[in-house]
Amino acid sequence: MLASGSGATTPGSSFGPAVIRGVQMPVQPPIPRRRKQRFSRSRTGCLTCRQRRVRCDEAHPVCEKCASLDRVCVWADGIVAASPAPGSLWMTEASLCDETGSGSDGGTDEALAGVDGSASPRSTSRPPAKKPRAMTGSSSRGQTAIALTRRSSASTRARAASLLPLVQAVSAPTSLTMGTSAIALRRARAQPQLPTFSFALPSVTPSTTMEPFMQAFPSPSARRLFHHYLTSTSTIVIAMGQRDDWSQNPFLAVSLPLISLNTESPARAALRLSLLSAAAAHIHHLRLSGPGAGAVAAAELAHDDMLAETRRAKRQATGKMLLSLSKEGDAELDAVLAACVIIMTRDVLSADAGWRDNLDFAIGLIHKRGGPAAMLARDPANYTRRFILEQLTTHDVFGSFTTGQEPNLLGAWAPWWFECEQASTTSAQWESCERQFGVSRGMIDVVARCRIVCWKKTRLGPDYAGDAELEAVADLLDQEAWGLIDELRIWAISQQDSPRKARIQFGDHIYRHAMTIYLLGDVLRVAAAEPSIQAAVHCVLELCSEISTEPVMLVWPLMIAGAAAAGADRDWARQLFDAFGSQYCYDLPMARRVLEEQWKRIDAGRGPEAWDVLMKEMGCNVLLI
């Protein structure tokens, strides 16, 4: 009931306050009308945007609007540029000219100023200028074919030739959502600049991010290294995700809670020392690889040998791990294994040939406790333990390429590898392996089985021909290899409608083609000049060019495809190595050195050599991933 009297008005009246049931209501101010923002029409934009009455950014040859919507971009001067088909990975010649033209300005790494070690922002690497080719097996460029003395039967060569239309049919994933245009992809995925930190400061300024760790890192030098690890080192060891968001970086999400708790534990001390060792290795690389690196390196090494410092920190971390096992038993086993993971990261960054001792130590601890499945069965909801075991397992799989041995932790069938639902509560945890390495769990399992088949074939030796029993075993292994090739082909078809993230799909298809090359060449002894292998080589190089903004964890596919490449494709592989350089450390130059030596032996008629044999002869037994 409305009250009447002086000053009382009906609700909604604009002449005075409303009184409802004796309560005076506040006057609501009138809501101003929003004026529609007017945009001036572009007079020089493409005709497609002008016809659709949308703003055109006037980028040539395909504007961003047309590229994002897969429309034909028509210009007033008669130029017609068609955007790639939805999901297409192949870059048009026009888009490549746009990327490499005089108008593009590629980012460059700035030198670390002086000896203070301030980290420079990571450069935005441009993809190498490479004209795409049609995915055909025959070469029309007059390039030199790879003449290899491989032993393969006529039936094997015929079956390999039958793969060519299959490789062409499923060479490019058709449902990728990473971007419909190479131009749009590179505009949208520009590399974020890493925060810098001046090592000339006497101490790290306490902040909300550093405060919980002040007790764990009491000295100024330790805080500086820890800060560099957080802001720089940890961002180059994951393949995807929001690298500056710690909750989205599984590497940090697991290690940081272990560091901040129980600072008196030898296992936690080992974890902190391994972390500082990885940061020191990264700083050493930055100071020696940037512009003016000679002067910086000379001044730096005169005061403090960072390389010796990182080795000393690694030795101290190993000692703390041994002390923890003798005093604490299995109470701090997760922290000990986490320290092994970070030491492996340090070994990868610094291309340390002593990586095998650390990995064997961790594998021995796991086997003594019944293996990964038994360790997870004791605590199925322990995400930290699962993540650490995944890290060790994946490094063991890729390390088997260097050692020539079979993987130790991931066999022919390992159900624990896929049973991650109990320990995962968030999407970041569910995709921890994918975020870290840029490939799916299933693909890592396939890579492990490819390595097992190759290891079995290698154990027969090179002279099994003529021995009926050994030839029967070799035929069984060849059938197993063909089964894996068929599985990879079916994998491509089944992944067409997969909802996975684009980076994971790119990684899966890159490894799919690389493993096809690996099985055909190293197990089935098919010559690299075969059209099916050359088609797979082109697919790997094309996909790596498309994903050059996120190239982490792609060393082995580039080496495997590069070894089978010839002529202009070798130059293409070299350009990819150059483009990937800003997101790797000493491991990428070492991989390139091994590949160059492989090419020399192939050209001299002495190759290709098995990777483990070649790296051992060169003294380059490093962990590559």
Image (cartoon, helix red, strand yellow):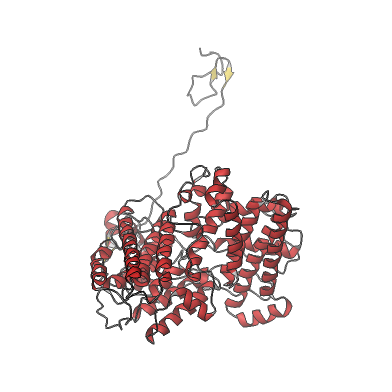
Depth check: 385 or 76 in front?
385
Residue 247 in the image: above or below residue 535: above
Please identify the quarter of the rendering in which residue 155 is found. bottom left
Say left or right for 64 vs 597: left
Relative image position of residue 393 (x, y in whole percent): 52, 58
Depth check: 393 or 123 in front?
393
Say left or right for 505 vs 203: left
Relative image position of residue 311 (x, y in whole percent): 67, 71
Relative image position of residue 364 (x, y in whole percent): 59, 59
Q: Is residue 74 visible?
A: no
x 42%, y 78%: residue? 609
Q: Is residue 161 visible?
A: yes
Residue 390 in the image: above or below residue 359: above
Residue 528 in the image: above or below residue 600: above
Q: Residue furthest bottom?
A: 604
Relative image position of residue 491 (x, y in whole percent): 33, 56
Please identify the quarter of the rendering in which residue 184 is found. bottom left
Residue 182 in the image: above or below residue 109: above
- Number of dots carrying numbers: 0
Depth check: 173 or 126 in front?
173
Say left or right for 303 vs 101: right
